[in-house]
Image (tube, rainbow, N blue to C red):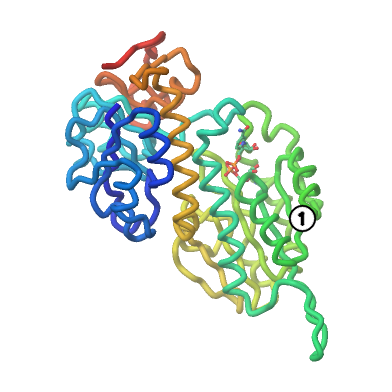
């Protein structure tokens, strides 16, 4: 299959395909075509791709059977995709009507990595998890750099320095990685999640699970938490308040797919923290877990620094890209036969769940709802490509 890797949007430091993973795809018989200068900012040189057997071209899209991206392409780029070809990447398909319209116009079969099921079967393709893990790790480093304190206990001739008290709110993939990273840096870590089953994971990482309301039904159907009623949210904030006040660093990661992030830290709770404390809010892009968070800005309130970085995974672009490229490769292997030829089986739960557009139609129910379209019957059974 001819696989194209165009340049990402300006400002994105990650790439969809790395030289190392290119080698694996070339060895499987695929023809890799990457855009010249694609990995410059993260240090992946054109020569490194070429050394692994890729062609480096100014316009890689020509004759592409599959195009892989990290972030959503512009509608303009989508209109340049070969008609009937396949696209895979984070497409933000529930928000971008223009992109979806362009994909329909070009009869592109588009797979959104964020729509893959979060199941054991799809684990190797789970790019949400790999990027969340990178972000959770980096959040602790950002907090450590912003905090005016040393994280581990330090016994010196000038006296003993107490370790930092770090609280993680929301212990999904990013939160658990933050717990592990903060532990390694020597902080005293506690954590909380609305899903009670996370308690064991938090404790197995050596952190303390704090006593605040849990929702027994939180992960019942989808594995995800659901939105809380106002009254429960108030009880939750009241229970969290003393733990937030006592923490030197708070890292928040609580999210609910497709909904605004839950409000866990009110401005009154920020005012109860010691001046010099730091909050890093990973939910900034979806409204923030802290009332005062502003995406990609630093807010200082009552001496507390509140950071809302939305590009944490991109700060560790090399490893985040390697993981993402491996996720994509696992997905590519899922949609190709042993002979390396495209073979789409819409009865495959992974293929079907991730497909947003196919043959000039919008298939994903959430995208259809977002665009105000009627529900539609999905195609079923294998469909072998060229
Ligand atoms: P996410 O980014 O959607 O949310 C982060 C965390 O915030 C979650 O743990 C969630 O429970 C928590 N949260 C939401 N509302 C909250 C509130 N009001 N108070 C406190 N915490 C709140 O989650 P994620 O990291 O993407 O993981 C989502 C689910 O998917 C989890 O159940 C995870 O175990 C599961 N998962 C499964 C697999 C797999 O089986 N292969 C892989 C990855 C994730």
Check disc 1: other Cα within 10 Å, few if <14, some if 14-19, many if 20+.
some
In percent of width and height, residue 232 lies at 70, 45
**As rendered, which of 3 and 207 lies closer to the eye?**
3
- The structure residue drawn at horizontal position 21% and vertical position 37%, both measured from the top left corner, is 61
Q: Which residue is mark 1?
A: 239
Can you tell which quarter of the image residue 217 is in? Answer: top right
Q: Secondary structure at mark 1?
A: helix
- The structure residue drawn at horizontal position 18% and vertical position 43%, both measured from the top left corner, is 59
Left or right of 157? Residue 222 is left
Left or right of 60? Residue 144 is right
Which quadrant is the N terminus positioned in? top left
- The structure residue drawn at horizontal position 69% and vertical position 55%, both measured from the top left corner, is 179
Q: Ligand 1 near label 1 (Cβ, under 8 Å)?
A: no
In percent of width and height, residue 8 lies at 30, 49
In percent of width and height, residue 239 lies at 77, 55
Q: Is residue 349 above or below residue 17?
A: above
In percent of width and height, residue 134 lies at 54, 52
Which quadrant is the C terminus positioned in? top left
Can you tell which quarter of the image residue 246 is in? Answer: bottom right
Q: Which quadrant of the picture is home to ligand 1?
A: top right
Which residue extends farthest top?
Answer: 381
Q: How many marks?
A: 1
Left or right of 311? Residue 3 is left
Can you tell which quarter of the image residue 110 is in? Answer: top left
**As rendered, which of 295 and 46 lies closer to the eye?**
46
- The structure residue drawn at horizontal position 63% and vertical position 32%, both measured from the top left corner, is 223
């Amino acid at each position: 299959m001819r696989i194209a890797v165009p340049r990402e949007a300006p400002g994105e430091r990650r790439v969809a395909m790395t030289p190392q993973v290119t080698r694996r795809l070339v060895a499987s018989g695929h023809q890799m075509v990457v855009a010249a200068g694609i990995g410059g900012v993260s240090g992946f040189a054109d020569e490194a791709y070429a050394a692994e057997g890729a062609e480096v071209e100014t316009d890689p899209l020509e004759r592409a059977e599959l195009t892989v991206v990290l972030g959503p392409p512009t509608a303009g780029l989508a209109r340049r995709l070969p008609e009937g070809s396949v696209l895979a990447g984070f497409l933000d398909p529930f928000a971008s009507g223009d992109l979806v319209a362009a994909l329909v116009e070009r009869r592109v079969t588009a797979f959104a990595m964020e729509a893959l099921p979060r199941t054991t079967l799809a684990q190797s393709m789970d790019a949400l998890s790999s990027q969340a893990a990178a972000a959770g790790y980096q959040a602790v480093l950002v907090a450590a750099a912003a905090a005016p304190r040393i994280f581990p206990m330090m016994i010196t001739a000038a006296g003993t320095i107490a370790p930092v008290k770090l609280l993680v709110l929301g212990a999904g993939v990013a939160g658990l990685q933050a717990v592990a990273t903060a532990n390694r840096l020597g902080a005293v870590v506690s954590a909380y999640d609305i899903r009670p089953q996370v308690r064991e994971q938090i404790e197995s990482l050596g952190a303390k699970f704090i006593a605040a309301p849990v929702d027994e039904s939180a992960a019942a159907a989808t594995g995800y938490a659901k939105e809380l009623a106002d009254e429960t949210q108030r009880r939750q904030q009241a229970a969290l308040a003393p733990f937030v006040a006592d923490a030197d660093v708070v890292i928040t990661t609580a999210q609910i797919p497709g909904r605004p992030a839950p409000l866990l830290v009110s401005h009154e709770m920020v005012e109860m923290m010691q001046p010099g404390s730091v909050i890093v809010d990973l939910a900034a892009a979806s409204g923030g877990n802290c009332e005062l968070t502003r995406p990609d800005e630093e807010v200082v309130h009552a001496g507390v620094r509140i950071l809302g970085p939305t590009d944490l995974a991109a700060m560790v672009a090399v490893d985040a890209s390697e993981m993402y490229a491996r996720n994509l490769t696992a997905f590519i292997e899922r949609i190709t036969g042993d002979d390396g030829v495209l073979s789409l089986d819409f009865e495959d739960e992974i293929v079907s769940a991730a497909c947003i557009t196919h043959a000039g139609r919008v298939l994903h129910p959430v995208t259809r709802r977002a665009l105000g379209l009627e529900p539609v019957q999905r195609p079923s059974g294998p469909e072998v490509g060229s």
